[in-house]
Image (spheres, rainbow, N blue to C red):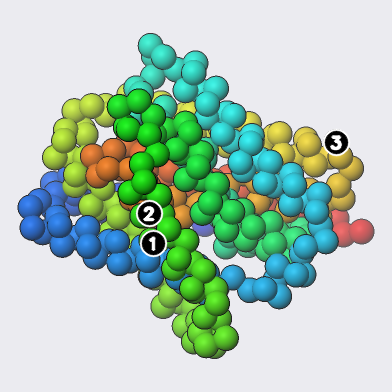
Amino acid sequence: MPRPFRINILKLDPFLLALIATVGLASLLPCRGQFAAGMEWITDAGIVLLFFLHGARLSREAIIAGLGAWRIHILTLAATFVLFPAIGLALRALSHGWLNPAIADGLLFLCLLPSTVQSSIAFTSIARGNVPAAVCSASASNVLGIFITPVLVGLFLMSGSRGGFAADSLLSIVLQLLLPFVLGHFSRPRTDKFISKHKSILGKVDRTTILLVVYTAFSAAVIEGLWHKYSVGDLAWTFALNGAILALVLFITRWTAKRVGLPIEDEIAVVFCGSKKSLASGVPMASVLFPPVLLGPMVLPLMLFHQMQLMVCAVLAQRYGERPSN
């Protein structure tokens, strides 16, 4: 029913509330000293476990099922790793003098991230789109993002005063992201049944890890004076620019899919897989790529974008799904 659907969309995601509460806790009671060191160790362990599970969840059967839809995959990857970064770079270039540089960097980091998997597939299904192709495109984006995002961050965000893309950053990426992911994927013969049986529990690992990273990130940023540098006006700009980026990408992906003559089911997969950014991958990646003092400003735009993309895409999926059947 349309009316109950709209009411549900306007409800805040419980995870968003948990993120807000975590930021509030870090602002009032930031972790310091030995406690902060312990939290960083726990967070690093959580990131390793998170990417191990990402690899273990990646089904080869799902990949094979959608491999034939190559035009969908090209458009999705182009949106994720070409269109989004171009928008982020253009925004940062045009923002000098009127936008807080921390916001511009955070928005650019958001634009360099891979797409989501679960929500892209879920919205494609609701919209009656090409689900096998969406599974393949979203999974490919997420996997390739483990390689591509750090390279893009090294090119566009880790320069000048940040000292470039250092060898220790590369080692952290390999040990905390790539190696656990590969080991997780090759563990599937032994872990597949357990993961399938405990999906709800394993889903909580994702969210718990993100909350740990957010708490440690914002603790370090608060100690360094985050809220003195990031005003209410800055938050308003972040929200407005997030909305503009999402609207522009949704328009371009839909327009491009129509221009190349994709059927409506394939268009839907391109729109939903190409327009989103992954909070589950982005926050842990930021923890590996950036020093603690930069993490808060880097992930704040992503946290806002996460909720915005869910609400907007839920409405769009419902409208696609209400079209007449052929």
Residue 232 location, quadrant: top left
Q: Secondary structure at mark 2?
A: helix
Residue 93 is situated, as x and y percent measured from the top left of the image, at 49, 18
Q: Is residue 281 visible in this depiction of the protein?
A: yes
Left or right position of 33 against 44: left
Q: Write down the residue under mark 2.
A: 171
In the picture shown, does residue 180 fall above or below 107?
below
Q: Nearer the viewer, residue 181 or 320?
A: 181
- Cβ atoms under marks 2 and 3 closer than 8 Å: no
Q: How far from the left and from the top, in percent, is residue 177?
A: 43, 60
Q: Is residue 196 visible?
A: no
| Quarter of the view holding residue 256 | top right
- Considering every residue shown, the one lying at the far left of the view is 33
Secondary structure type for disc 3: helix
Q: Residue at x 32, y 37 (%)?
A: 297
Q: Which residue is mark 1?
A: 175
- Quarter holding residue 295: top left
Q: The residue under label 1 is which amino acid type?
A: Leu
Answer whether labels 1 and 3 touch (C-beta < 8 Å).
Answer: no
Q: Residues within 10 Å of mark 2 (few under 14, many from 20)?
A: few
Mark number displayed over residue 259: 3
Q: Mark 2: which amino acid? A: Leu
Find out whether the residues at labels 2 and 1 contact each other: C-beta distance under 8 Å. yes
Direction from residue 17 to residue 196 in the image, left or right: right
Please give the name of the residue rendered at 36% of the width and 41% of the height, measured from the top-left corner: 166
Residue 208 to residue 256: above or below: below
Helix, strand or loop status at disc 1: helix
